[in-house]
Amino acid sequence: MNPITIVGGGLAGSAAALSARAEGAAVLLFEKSAFPRHKVCGEFVSPGARAVLEDLGVWDAFEEAGPAPISRVALVFGMRRKEWRLSEPGYGISRHRFDDLLLNKARERGAEVIHGHGEPSGTSIIAHGRRESARGERLFGFKAHFEGPADDAVTLHFFRNCYVGVSSVEGGRTNVCGLAPERVLRAHGFEVEPILGGNEWLSARIQPLTRVMDWMITGPLVFGCHFDGKVTAGRYLTGDALGFVDPFTGAGMLGALITGLRAGRAAATGISPREYLRECEAALGGAYRVAAVFRAALRSGVADWIGPLIPGKLLLSLTRPKY
Ligand SMILES: Cc1cc2nc3c(=O)[nH]c(=O)nc-3n(C[C@H](O)[C@H](O)[C@H](O)COP(=O)(O)OP(=O)(O)OC[C@H]3O[C@@H](n4cnc5c(N)ncnc54)[C@H](O)[C@@H]3O)c2cc1C
């Protein structure tokens, strides 16, 4: 039997490899980067991920990696702050650790992993991450790790069309990750710290921390999904290649795990790409729609006023992928 080809060994590709192997399919996975590698990401793994990681058979390994438990969420709009306790914890874990862990598990379970550029061939899972585009206002993401006092909250600061998340990851480190329009970055010579310094709450939060890696910048970022895009026989788009949800939701990794798991299962058991896309739309469509509305509100400045009025728990649940 020809193997299923997987292009990309991020969370979606590795989840696909694990679920395809669980169905007994042969898997050939291509990953172009040397692992472990850092990646621009808020590194907040959403509540709800545990069930998916258990079904992928990697929950114990995930726990052993020592993710930081995240039990509170705080949203800060200008000088107004709202905070709530999560009913189920989230987790802070670096992509350096998480992606490597999942790819190694896929390899251990029999996926053949080739380090190099891959192309779809035969039945294929496309897990190459998000697409980039130069259209519209160009947004860029940035991140760095810090050492210093840790916290059990993920805090998101919204200001001047930017937002910046601060949360703990394994090993007592803190991840600072945000999104800014190109014009804001350009105005500061693509230096991140002056942008953070312009926000009082953020400056106070970061002041006792020491940065332990260079800032990474990625982009331009393009939000949107392709659930109703052209379907090609034998091709399963998954993770960010299928759709990129606004990072403020903290739902991208969960979406990548869910669609990856489903793609691997579908490819291995002969579920058609169209049927697979219907499953993905049912799981993720609502989260994308709510995130798009919130992004438009952020862009127009309305979110600074209505954001503090929206019940946080409701916003979180509306932007959660279903599993
Ligand atoms: C600024 C920012 C903050 C974010 N914060 C969060 C957060 O806090 N929580 C959350 O859940 N999500 C967050 N996300 C979203 C999250 O990072 C993504 O949803 C997630 O990385 C998607 O995983 P993926 O496997 O689909 O893609 P990726 O992680 O991008 O993996 C794709 C892999 O494919 C490889 N590849 C690409 N092309 C090829 C090729 N031709 N051949 C071989 N290999 C290839 C790449 O090297 C890469 O390793 C954030 C995103 C951004 C930009």
Image (spheres, helix red, strand yellow):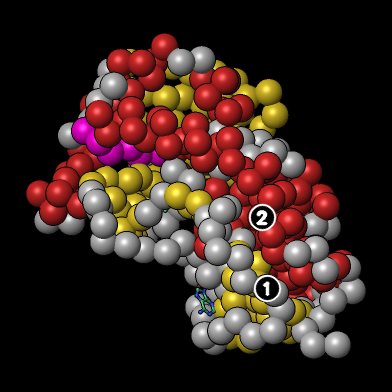
Q: Look at 77% across and 69% down and name the residue there.
A: 267
Percent across and percent down for residue 230 are 55, 64
Residue 2 located left or right of residue 238: right
Percent across and percent down for residue 30 are 61, 81
Q: In the image, what residue type sits under mark 1?
A: Ala
Q: Is mark 2 within 8 Å of ligand 1?
A: no
Residue position marked by numbered label 2 in the rendering: 277
Q: In the image, what residue type sits under mark 2?
A: Leu
Give above or below for 219 relative to 318.
below
Residue 66 among magenta residues: no
**Numbered disc 1: secondary structure:** loop
Q: Which residues are magenta?
A: 159-165
Percent across and percent down for residue 229 are 54, 59
> In which quadrant will I find the C terminus?
top right
> In which quadrant will I find the N terminus?
bottom right
Give above or below for 255 relative to 61.
above
**Numbered disc 2: secondary structure:** helix
Image quadrant where residue 113 sits: bottom right
Give above or below for 38 relative to 88.
below
